[in-house]
Image (cartoon, helix red, strand yellow):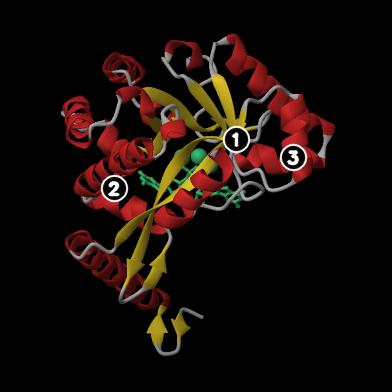
Amino acid sequence: QAKVSGKTRHEVFATKMQEQALAYLELEADLRTAIANQEFELYYQPIVSLNSGTIVGFESLVRWHSPQRGFVSPASFIPIAEETGLIIPLGKWILQQACLQMQIWQAQFSHCQSLTISVNLSGRQFSQPNLVEQIEEILQITNLNAQSLKLEITESMVMDDVEEAIILLNRLKALGVRLSMDDFGTGFSSFSYLHRFPMDTLKVDRSFVSNMSKSVKNQAIVTTIITLAHQLEMDVVAEGIETETEMKSLQAKNCEYGQGYFFSKPVDREQATLLITKTLQ
Ligand code: C2E
Ligand code: MG
Ligand code: MG
Ligand code: MG
């Protein structure tokens, strides 16, 4: 029973491990050249006011068009970029690109002055010792107002070392940038710490939004998260709104903003510019 096609289970397992390790190394090597070869592109997903239907900002979402692999989802390459440290140069490029794009939109369209650009930070970027200086420099280089930049941070990033995270978040706030708690409710439950983090916005994770229709209890969870955020003086963005029913339900719960396929999928720079000219003018 220990033999599978002439090999022991252990040998089969070891071969699998080697294959996985090799695949990982190849992906890492491709990722390394991807930055130099400019294979990354930012997509932008509108964040919409649920009351007025107008766009209040965009979240930037990185895309990798690999000549060898085709389209690679950030969910699969961001973790490897994290582990290998490649997220540091990639993250810097993303921040710079996103800030530059928002500055261009603001310079191009007078009605875009209050739009924000939300940029996802990764754990490793967050623990970079010079993060605050790097962001300050990027704002200078791109000439973007600090209040137009919103950094998306997840619970797990701040729960590693709560005290240190609070200090860092306050330093970022002092720059004038805004902060969002991303994917709220999915990771560590930071309920008891939430009031200590200087967040402007809480993003309700898509899983809560898509579960809402399933039961009254799921509705209650969303209502509670929104109420909690408001009592802590944060506004709320609901992620992953796909239907009008979800949108209406969130609106009724006094959720200010929403994001999701119901409004728009993440789109490239040209399409995002088109959305701006169509819906804001
Ligand atoms: P996230 O920050 O929570 O981003 C939201 C994800 O939900 C995006 O997936 C977006 O395309 C997707 N989404 C938006 N609306 C809907 C909807 O209505 N239905 C469904 N099913 N999905 C929706 P994406 O772009 O594949 O990114 C996945 C994750 O990868 C992001 O989750 C974020 O954690 C990470 N990521 C993406 N871009 C970056 C980046 O530039 N830097 C870092 N550090 N992480 C990034
Ligand atoms: Mg995000
Ligand atoms: Mg999110
Ligand atoms: Mg999410």
- Which residue is labeled 2 in the image? 82
Earlier-in-chain disc, 3 versus 1 = 1
Instruction: Check mark 1 vs ligand 1: CB closer than 8 Å? yes or no.
Output: no
What crowding class fits label 3: few (fewer than 14 Cα within 10 Å), some (14-19), or many (20 or more)? Answer: many
Q: Quadrant of residue 142?
A: top left
Amino acid type of the residue that numbered disc 3 sits on in the rendered structure: Glu
Earlier-in-chain disc, 2 versus 1 = 1
Q: Give coordinates of residue 76: x percent, y percent.
A: 41, 58
Q: Nearer the viewer, residue 142 or 2?
A: 142
Amino acid type of the residue that numbered disc 2 sits on in the rendered structure: Glu
- Please report the residue visible at 66 percent of the width from the left and 25 percent of the height from the top: 255
Lateral position of residue 247 relative to residue 233, left or right: right
What crowding class fits label 1: few (fewer than 14 Cα within 10 Å), some (14-19), or many (20 or more)? Answer: some
- Please report the residue visible at 16 percent of the width from the left and 29 percent of the height from the top: 130
Q: Give coordinates of residue 72: x percent, y percent.
A: 40, 64
- Marks 3 and 1, how far apart in space? 17 Å
Check contact, mark 3 vs mark 2: CB within 8 A: no
Q: What is the secondary structure assignment of the residue under circle 1?
A: loop
What crowding class fits label 2: few (fewer than 14 Cα within 10 Å), some (14-19), or many (20 or more)? Answer: some
Q: Nearer the viewer, mark 2 or mark 1?
A: 1
Check contact, mark 2 vs mark 1: CB within 8 A: no
Vertical relation: 42 (above or below) 193: below
- Which residue is labeled 3 in the image? 246
Instruction: Check mark 2 vs ligand 1: CB closer than 8 Å? yes or no.
Output: yes
- Which residue is labeled 1 in the image? 54
**Residue sitting at the far right:** 216
- Marks 3 and 2, how far apart in space? 34 Å
- Marks 2 and 1, how far apart in space? 35 Å
Q: Nearer the viewer, mark 3 or mark 1?
A: 1
| Residue 268 appears in the picture as rendered | no
